[in-house]
Amino acid sequence: MNKFFWNGFCFVAIIVALIIYACANRGYPQGGEKDVTPPQVIKEVPESFSTNFKGKQIDIYFNEYVQLKDINKKFVMSPPMKKKARVSLRGKYVRVTFQDSLKPNTTYTLDFADAIVDNNEGNPLGFYRYVFSTGPQLDSMELGGQVIDMQTQLPVLGATVMFYQNTADSVALTDLPSYVAKTDSAGMFRVTNIKDDTYRVMAIDDARGNYLFVPSETKVGFIDSLIQTISFPTTVYDTIHPDTTVVEGRRTKKGMEFKVVSKDTIVRRDFTMFGPTNLFIPMFDEEKTQLYLVDEARKERERLDFTFSIPADNQLNVRLLGVHLLDKIDQDDWYIEERSAGRDTIQLWIKDSLVYKIDSLVAEASYLRTDSLGKRVLLADTIKFYYKDKPEPKGKRKKEQDSIPAIKFMEISAGVGSTVDLNKNITLEFDRPIVEEGLKNIQLLEMVDSVLTPVDFNLKHDSLKIRRYYVEKEWKPETEYQLLIDSMGIYSIYGLYNNKLVKDFKTKAIEDYGNIIVNVKEATTPIILQLYQGDKEIKVLEERTIKGDGKVIFDYLGEGTYMIRAILDRNGNGKWDTGNYLKHLQPEEIKYLPTEIKLKKNFDVEQDFDMSKTYKREDPSKKKNTEGDKKRNRTNR
């Protein structure tokens, strides 16, 4: 052998050996590295993928002590059993005991997800699945996909996905599913080793843990069509990197040159794919239909409260019983009705002092409720209301007999700060129903040449909350105003007058605002555009409706970060409608624009929103910012 070649070869070999040695002998910090190695399965009794199983238990052995983390939530046996299997921890092994009879000729999977962790650092084993069959063969088909919350467009964790060979709609209300799976944090699910068949697929939030769907109470999602399992051959080509290296040499004018090379190998793999594994299940809350009285209360002497299970235009009629003053009371006109914004609470303000001064009232309340057949019927219910004045706090010094009692005023809440937006109204809310004659004493004054001058305005009454009014005015920019209600100007139906109210404020400048212009494209239904802020708790700020393609302008917006979502209002009723499983009705689709819009003062931001595109809503903590497709200063247009 050429001496020069041999010396060069030895030199390269030594260098390679030193590199390998250095990589294999890294130093550790004092105390050793943190254990990140998950436990390993060393034995299964019987082995996974066994057939002709006749036993009552399965033992899974590990190379170290393990723990079970949230096993009751994460462990899934499929097909499910009426009496669930018991999973117990026995040091270095886990035992699964079957408490119900196994079906003959059936393939079962025991899915532990990531519930098995080591005893020291909690390192999860991973998504461990054990398979066995009570017959001579193992089923091999599988289905998979993702569950997404239709309103938030985010993955659903822990949803129970159910697969039925009996494809009747009602089977989900009465029978256990043929197979089950649970979703992970990405909303993904996978059920393996199932029979080759056609399935009805749905998902529920199985809080009761019984694999049964309860209409209007259980969160649900479903696929419109039946799903047929499929299998097909496929080929994958992998590049294999060998563990050893080769030193190649070549002769040059300067002598021999050497290099260490690795020769890759292309390997062909033929196998069978099962599916489909790209199923999509939109999940939603059905509209609650059970109407009933949840609570009745008398929190104030002059008021009776009725709270119902769902928002409804419920007809409530209340008649007093057993009161010795009944002959002096008009049963059709002894209270004023007020409804909450959500329409699920009705408050009755008692007008007659002969009634509200009585501590114990008995009344017959007639209202609609849902019966056992699902129909709404009129129910008459006798209810007792009791109220007792709160005693004075202990230790409070008694007032002298000749002391003058403090005047009690009616409280007024004025929704106005030091500044007011040019497009906003001022809200006035009284703590008791008022006599409307006093509303004429509300004044609005505008600063004109350094003098507060009365100006006209419109006072609008809220349609539901009878104690609420809105001061409407076309405000001038950068102008000082004063809202004034003199003492004793307004009084309640109980004879309480107001204390003097003075609110000074100034309107904002036009330059304080920006606009967001949304270009709606490819719309095939009416679109409800919502401008919102917040991630986990979404606060809708503005809403606009458009019948098709076009521009939507959100104006008078302060500097800040905004987001946009679109409701595809397929029935054109101006609101989002949920779905219904038994009626085969999917909820209306909601699309979230995946980017945030940062708006500055005196700027317009223009943003395209294509309704034909599929948008994936990102995790709120990972969303990226944008300043829109186009941005311009309004003063430089």
Image: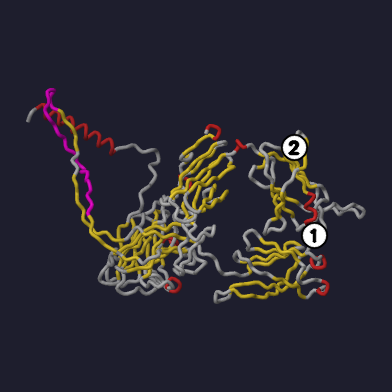
**Residue type for callout 2:** Met
Judging from the image, what secondary structure is the residue with disc 1 in? loop
Determine which quarter of the picture holds residue 105: bottom left
Which residue is situated farthest in the left direction here? 1
Q: Is residue 247 magenta?
A: yes
- 556 vs 22, left or right, is right
Residue 447 got which mark? 2
Q: Which residues are magenta?
A: 235-256
- 136 vs 568, left or right, is left
Tell me the distance, in whole angstroms, between the alpha carbons under discs 2 and 1: 34 Å
What residue do we see at 32% from left, 37% from top?
26
Q: Is residue 588 magenta?
A: no
Mark nearer the N terminus (2 vs 1): 2
Determine which quarter of the picture holds residue 436: bottom right
Residue 493 got which mark? 1
What residue do we see at 61% from left, 75% from top?
377
**Residue type for callout 1:** Ile
